[in-house]
Amino acid sequence: MRKLKFFFAAFALFAALMLFGGTAYRANAASDEYYLGGMTAGFSLSAGGTEVIGLSEVCAEDGIHRPADEVGIQIGDLICAADGIQIRTIDDLNRALENCDGKEIRFTIKRDGERADVKILPVKDKKNGKYKIGVLIRDTLTGIGTVTYIKKDTLEFGSLGHAVCDENNQSLEISDPKVYLCSVIGVNKGKRGKAGELRGLFLNDKKIASAEQVKKTGLYGKFDREYDFSHSETIGIAPLSEATIGKAVIYSTIDGVCPQKYEICIAKVDENNRENKNFVIKVTDEKLISETGGIVQGMSGSPIVQNGKLIGAVTHVFLNDPTRGYGIGIEKMIEN
C-alpha cells in the first residue's frame, strides 16, 4: 500500500511539472538561440562488443574446423564477454584467444537483445599457430549524417532525427560515439525504388564533437569549443503549430564541407505522428534534384527552415519518389 501511495504522489508531481514546468520549458526553448546545422558529420560508434559479420574455417593440423559455426554462432551476433571478461574490441577478443592455452572459452553472446553463454573450443591455425574460433568481426560502426542544430550557449547538438540503425534497419545500442568532420566526395543519386547516398571522407584529425546519447529521435552530444562557428548562422526555433503547407528550405552538404540552402515544399504537417514523421516534404530545387535525385542517405538531420525559423529536420526518403520524404518537428528533437 505504501508503494501505491508513493506512485500516486510521484505521478501528481510529474503531472504538475508537465503542466507548469513543461510550459516554461517550451517558452525557454523557443527563446533560445541555435547555430544552424547542415554540415555532414562522420560518426564512429562502438557496437558495444565485437559483431560477427562472417563465419570462416580454421585450418588446423588435423583438418578443417568451424568452431563458431558448429555451436550456432550467427552473423549479427555480438560477442560481449569471454569467461566473464568484457569484450569491447577486436584486440580484446584476440587477447582472450591468445591466453586460452587451447582450453574451452565461455563466450557471452548477445542476439536480438537477449544474452546467452556458449562454450567454444578454439582451434590452433596451422599457418601462424594462433588460436581462432572461425569468425570475421568488427568492433566499430561508421556512417555519415547531418547535424541539425547546436545550442549556442551550451554547444549541445542534435542530429539525424531518427534512431541509429544497421544495414537491416534494426535499431542499435551503441557506446563511445565520436563525431568527425566529414567531407562529401561524391553522391550516388537516388532513383525510384533505390535510395541514393552521400559518399563521405572522414577527416579523422578533425574531431568536432562528442556524442553522448542515442535516442529514437537522433544522436545527441556536445560540440567542441574549438570548433569554428564564425560562419555559422544563428536561428530561433518554431513549434509545429507554426509550420504551414508551402515553401520552405533545407540546409544540406552534398559537396565538400559547406552546407548550402535548397528549396522544398512542405506538403503535409502532422503534429500527432509518433514515428518522427511530422512533415511530408518535396524537394523542388532543380540543382539538388540534378545532383542527388532528391533526398539521399546521409542527408538525415538536414535542418528544415520556414519563415526564418528552424522547424524540423529531414529524416526519411520515399523509395518510390526520392524527391519526397519525411521530416521530424524540431521541438520533438530538442525535448529528447
Image (cartoon, grey):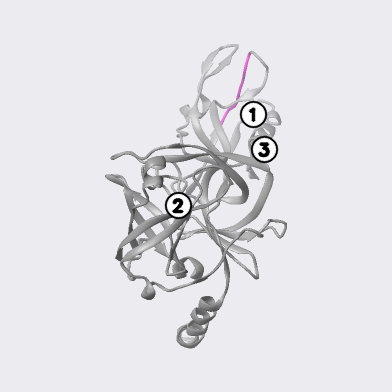
User: Could you say where residue 220 lies in the image, as x and y percent from the top left?
Assistant: 56, 60
Rendered residue at 45%/59% (across/down): 216
Of 165 and 252, the residue lying toward us? 252
Q: Kindly report the distance in space between the C-alpha atoms of the residues bearing marks 2 and 1.
A: 47 Å
User: Could you say where residue 91 lies in the image, as x and y percent from the top left?
Assistant: 67, 35
What's the amino acid at mark 3?
A: Asp
What's the amino acid at mark 1?
A: Lys
Q: Which residue is mark 3?
A: 92
Of 301 and 170, the residue lying toward us? 301
> Residue 103 — which label?
1
Q: Quarter of the image holding residue 250?
A: bottom left
> Residue 300 — which label?
2
Residue 83 makes an appearance in the image: no
Assess disc 3: are there few (<14), some (14-19) or many (≥20) residues with their C-alpha within 10 Å of its C-alpha. Answer: some
Q: What residue range appears in magenta?
A: 120-126
**Looking at the image, how many numbered discs can be counted on the residues?**
3
Q: Kindly report the distance in space between the C-alpha atoms of the residues bearing marks 2 and 3.
A: 33 Å
What's the amino acid at mark 2?
A: Ser
